[in-house]
Amino acid sequence: MAIRLLALDVDGTITNSRNDITPVTVAAIRRAMDAGLTVALNTGRDLSESRQVLDLVPEIHYLMGCTGAYLMDLRSGKRLVSHAMDASLARAAHDILRRYDTMVNLYMDDEVYNDDWALRDFERFYPPALRSVMKAHHAVPDLGALLAAREAPVDKYYVMFTDEAEHREAMAQMRRLPLFVTRAAFLDMEIMHAAANKGAILRDLAGLLGLDMAEVAAVGDSENDVAMLQTAGVGVAMGNAKPAVQALADVVAPRSDEDGLAWAIDRILKEAV
């Protein structure tokens, strides 16, 4: 069955290790759309952070943001599906996180918030190449105070750690809450509503478009991409993915630094996957 929907992760898939999006990658995404495929982002990023891609390819119609927390129609700006966590659960999660040496990114209302000290101390937690992503974030004096006054749901936490033992302990603590907890690429943690993951939201989009999952391909590189790689009819892991992720994919593409996404798209268009 021909592929009609292509779901793309951003970090490590569309972007390379320098957080760049090459002209080769942009041209490949456009080839897929010119061939009639619906191309959608399925990313841990929110709308503001996804502008790096959308400014280059504004024709992209759908955003599955915050690791499955929502599906957005980019033309209308409306959320078609939402799996946001209750504010009380978000506060409980934050109470755990504040015990550790972490940089907490709080996603809500299509924006990202950080403690102001954490943004100043950015390079203790993140590779310097990702500094540009933080331009879309908002610094606040105290995330805890921001959450204390919050009644509306929260999309996601993305949390960076500096110590592996603390990371393991925090993961164990967080998994006692009724939330979905996963990892992306670094010494990190993603925390969402229990129903939120990249596979479930991809199935939601396919259903809205009236597609069978056999008509869906997905490309990603991280642990948080496994659900969509296994849900799609064709799951493609990038060559920079960990071996455990590659082992669960149908196809392994070259690395993002080698324009592996372009290779994958051309294979899909030739129905060679």
Image: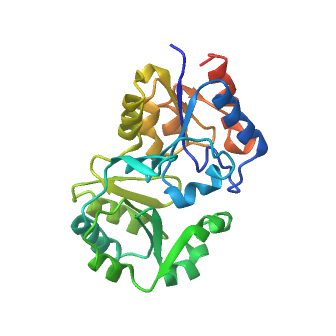
Whether residue 111 sits left or right of residue 69 in the image: it is right
Whether residue 68 sits left or right of residue 20 in the image: it is left
Residue 142 percent across, percent down from the top left: 39, 84
Whether residue 9 sits left or right of residue 67 in the image: it is right
Q: Splitting the image into 4 quarters, where does residue 191 fall?
A: bottom left
Number of numbered discs visible in the structure rendering: 0
Residue 238 percent across, percent down from the top left: 60, 38
Q: Is residue 76 above or below residue 251?
A: below
Q: Splitting the image into 4 quarters, where does residue 174 fall?
A: bottom left
Look at the image and tell me whether residue 160 can be seen.
no
Furthest residue in direction top, as rendered: 1
What's the image's color scheme?
rainbow
Furthest residue in direction right, as rendered: 23
The one nearer the camera, 63 or 250, is: 63
- Residue shown at the point (35%, 38%) measured from the top left: 200
- Residue shown at the point (39%, 37%) measured from the top left: 199
- Residue shown at the point (33%, 65%) measured from the top left: 170
Q: Is residue 46 above or below residue 213?
A: below
Residue 103 percent across, percent down from the top left: 47, 73
Q: Is residue 44 above or below residue 265?
A: below
Look at the image and tell me whether residue 272 can be seen.
yes
The one nearer the camera, 88 or 130, is: 88
Which image quarter holds the C terminus?
top right
The one nearer the camera, 168 or 40, is: 40
Residue 45 percent across, percent down from the top left: 51, 55
